[in-house]
C-alpha cells in the first residue's frame, strides 16, 4: 500500500476520533466550567503523555524543535480546546461542525506556508468545491446565521490548522505521537493553575456520562487521535490528508444525533456522499514538493 493511501486511511480514522469532540464538549458543559474542560483535559492527557515519554526514553527535543512544539501547543493544546469549548456554550455542536468545514483548506494553506507542499490548481479547485459544499449545506440547514460564538469557532479553526500543519512537519523529525506528547508536557506549566482554579468542588456528584465525556476529550481528542492524525499527515502529505476533514462535520452531526438528540435528514445523507466523492477526487489531484 502506498504511503499516500495509508495516510488517507489513517486520516479517516483520525477524523472519526476528532469528529466526536464537539458533541462530547457540548454534553459535558452543563457540569463543568468551560476553562476546566478546555485545559483540564490537556492536564489529564499530559500525565499519560509524560509517562509514555519516560517509558520509551524519548530524547528531549532540541531548541529549534521546542520552538515549533510551542506553536503546536498554542494551537491544539490551548487555542482549539478553549475557543471551541466557549463556543459550545452558545451554539449547537452541528453548527460548530459546519464552521469547521473550512478547516481542510485552512490546514492546506498553512502547509504551503510552513512546508514544502505546492498543491496543483486542480487540488485547490476540488478543495474549494468541498468547502462550498459544506457551506451550502450549512445554509440549507439554517446554520448559516452569524453568532458571536462563530468568532471563537474561527479562532479555534485557525489554531487547529496551525497546530496540525506545524505538528505534522515536526513529526517527520520526532515521530507523530512524540509531537503531541511533548507539546502537552511543554504546556503543562501554563495550563495547570487555570485548571486548578476552575476545577469543580463536586466531582463525586457528576453523572457517569459526564466522566465518560471528559475522559474521551482528554484521552482520545487530546492525545490518542493525534497519534493517528500526525502519522497520517506525515505519510500522505498535509494538504492531501487534511481534505479528509471535509467529512468531519458529518461525523460530528451523526454523533450529535446519537448522543445529543439532534436531527439528521436525507439532505445530510446526500451531502455526505457528495463530500466523500470530493475527498476521493482530491486524493487523486497532484501535489508538488519543493526543496527547502
Image (cartoon, rainbow, N blue to C red):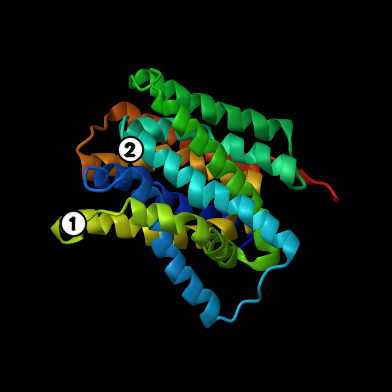
Write down the residue under mark 1. 202
Tell me the quarter of the picture where residue 218 sits.
bottom left
Given residues 56 and 286, the one toward you in this image is 56
The residue depicted at 41 percent of the width and 52 percent of the height is 194
Location of the N terminus by quadrant is bottom right
Q: Position of residue 268 (x, y in %)?
A: 34, 30
The residue depicted at 51 percent of the width and 55 percent of the height is 190
Q: Please determine whether, in this image, residue 85 is positioned above or below residue 131.
A: below
Q: Position of residue 199 (x, y in %)?
A: 30, 54
Given residues 181 and 192, the one toward you in this image is 192
Query: Which label number is shown at residue 253?
Result: 2
Residue 236 can be seen, yes or no: no
Q: Earlier in the sequence, mark 2 or mark 1?
A: 1
Q: Position of residue 142 (x, y in %)?
A: 33, 19
Given residues 208 and 240, the one toward you in this image is 208
The residue depicted at 52 percent of the width and 53 percent of the height is 11
Query: Which label number is shown at residue 97?
Result: none
The residue depicted at 33 percent of the width and 57 percent of the height is 216
Q: Nearer the viewer, mark 2 or mark 1?
A: 1
Amino acid at each position: 500500500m502506498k504511503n499516500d493511501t495509508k495516510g488517507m486511511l489513517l486520516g479517516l480514522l483520525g477524523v472519526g476520533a476528532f469528529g466526536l469532540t464537539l458533541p462530547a464538549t457540548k454534553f459535558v458543559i452543563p457540569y463543568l466550567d468551560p476553562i476546566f474542560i478546555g485545559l483540564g483535559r490537556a492536564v489529564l492527557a499530559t500525565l499519560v503523555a509524560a509517562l509514555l515519554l519516560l517509558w520509551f526514553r524519548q530524547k528531549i527535543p532540541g531548541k529549534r524543535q521546542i520552538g515549533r512544539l510551542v506553536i503546536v501547543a498554542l494551537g491544539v493544546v490551548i487555542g482549539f480546546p478553549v475557543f471551541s469549548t466557549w463556543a459550545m456554550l452558545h451554539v449547537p455542536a452541528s453548527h460548530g461542525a459546519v464552521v469547521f468545514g473550512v478547516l481542510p483548506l485552512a490546514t492546506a494553506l498553512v502547509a504551503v506556508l510552513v512546508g514544502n507542499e505546492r498543491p496543483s490548481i486542480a487540488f485547490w479547485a476540488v478543495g474549494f468545491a468541498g468547502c462550498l459544499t459544506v457551506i451550502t449545506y450549512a445554509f440549507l440547514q439554517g446554520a448559516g446565521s452569524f453568532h458571536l460564538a462563530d468568532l471563537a469557532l474561527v479562532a479555534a479553526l485557525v489554531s487547529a490548522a496551525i497546530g496540525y500543519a506545524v505538528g505534522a512537519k515536526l513529526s517527520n523529525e520526532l515521530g507523530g505521537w512524540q509531537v503531541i506528547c511533548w507539546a502537552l508536557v511543554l504546556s503543562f506549566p501554563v495550563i495547570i493553575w487555570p485548571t486548578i482554579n476552575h476545577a469543580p468542588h463536586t466531582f463525586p456528584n457528576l453523572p457517569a456520562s459526564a466522566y465518560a465525556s471528559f475522559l474521551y476529550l482528554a484521552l482520545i481528542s487530546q492525545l490518542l487521535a493525534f497519534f493517528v492524525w500526525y502519522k497520517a499527515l506525515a505519510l500522505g502529505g498535509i494538504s492531501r490528508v487534511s481534505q479528509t476533514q471535509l467529512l468531519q462535520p458529518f461525523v460530528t452531526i451523526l454523533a450529535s444525533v446519537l448522543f445529543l438528540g439532534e436531527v439528521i435528514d436525507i439532505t445530510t445523507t446526500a451531502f455526505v456522499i457528495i463530500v466523500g466523492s470530493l475527498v476521493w477526487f482530491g486524493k487523486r489531484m497532484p501535489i508538488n514538493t519543493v526543496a527547502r
